[in-house]
Image: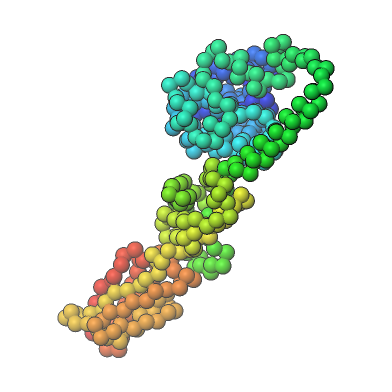
Amino acid sequence: MAENQVAKDVFISYKSEDVALAKALSHYLVSKGLSVFVSSQTLPQLGSSDYRKAIDSALDECRHMIVVGSKVDYLSSLWLEAEWGFFISEKRAGRKKGNILTVVTDDIEIKNLPASLRYYEVIFFEEENFERIAAYVGKDYQDRVYKPKRQAILKSKWLLPGISLLVLTGLLWYYINEKNKPFDATVFVRPDAALNLHPDYPVFEGGELSLYIGSKEDKKSVLPNQSITFQQIPISFAGKRIGAKLNAQNWKLLTDTVLLNTNAIYISIVPDGSLASVYGNIKDGKGNPVEGCSIAIDGDTIIHSNAAGLFKVNLPYYMQKNQYILSITRRDFYSQKIDYFSASGSVDIVLKH
């Protein structure tokens, strides 16, 4: 099958710096009759104007994945991790039965690879290894070397007991392995559904979310309306609450803990109070404090200055926003109307007779 069709056999995931490695491996696999998706070749030939959609379709339909990298940092890059992370999640959920293997240059130490990739096969990028790579993804093509050899069936009274023992051992190993296998936590960060915010309150634009798993801080970038995955969490933390922290402008976590589980986790966020305070001082033209001034905020909430001319109020969620209009009135003084910006802090107001 040519490389200009949407491939269903092999998806090669790589960073643009490793395009030469990906192409070399792709050409070999295609020569064996496999369909291969390589974005730098496949997408232009598809004529797709929506590359992300085409990549998602190829990820969804491919049977096997090969992750290619010449540096460990490349394998942990945002889009590359999203691709192989999706495939592994589908494989663990039983929706994909194919193989995933990582092909790296020989200057990379396997121990430095992401744990989720080390869990599966890792092969060094050398031409003499291409045949071995093809064996993991090429069950459908006709090279004789990849056809399984017929095994003679042993005629022995020990055959059935031996098979039964192997099956029981395999089942026991599977049970222990599955029971203790680390899990991935898929997290969504979104404003609390019970909030009644002002329409002009700044929307959540993303930030950094940290989960404190034991003594380790795992920090990831989070975007609005998108999930993030914390991988390889020890199974001992399932069903437990752990510390959490969000670094984002104008927003904070509703609580500073998260309950871990193997299903999707939804974390609620609320305004952090940075836009809640309105405060300042009022003086006359001679610099004397003016007591008893009426300060209306957006023509609604009204507060008064004290004997020192000071005023301050913390507004509820439904009033908070970046900018307010303050209307200041006092008998025997001219009224004033000013724009107050939440980030400006204390404001000095001078009333004239």
In terms of depth relative to the viewer, which is nearer, 41 or 125?
Answer: 125
> Residue 292, located in which quarter of the rendered image?
bottom left
Camera sees residue 118: yes
Residue furthest bottom as drawn: 331
In terms of depth relative to the viewer, which is nearer, 262 or 10?
Answer: 262
> Residue 65, located in which quarter of the rendered image?
top right
Is 173 placed above or below 183 here?
A: above
How far across and how far down the image is residue 20, in percent?
50, 19
Q: How many marks can you see?
A: 0
Q: Quadrant of the C terminus?
A: bottom left
Colour convention of the picture: rainbow
How far across and how far down the image is residue 170, in percent?
70, 33
Camera sees residue 203: no
In terms of depth relative to the viewer, which is nearer, 268 or 198?
Answer: 268
In this image, 76 relative to 331: left or right?
right
In this image, 203 relative to 100: left or right?
left
Residue visible at 56% across and 33% down in the picture? 119
Residue visible at 65% across and 18% down in the picture? 135
> Residue 232, located in which quarter of the rendered image?
top right
Residue visible at 31% across and 65% down in the picture? 344
In terms of depth relative to the viewer, which is nearer, 345 or 324?
Answer: 345
Residue visible at 61% across and 49% down in the picture? 262
Q: Quadrant of the N terminus?
A: top right
How far across and how far down the image is residue 149, in percent?
74, 13
In this image, 296 relative to 152: left or right?
left
Residue furthest left as drawn: 286
How far across and how far down the image is residue 86, in percent?
60, 38
Is 319 placed above or below 255 here?
A: below
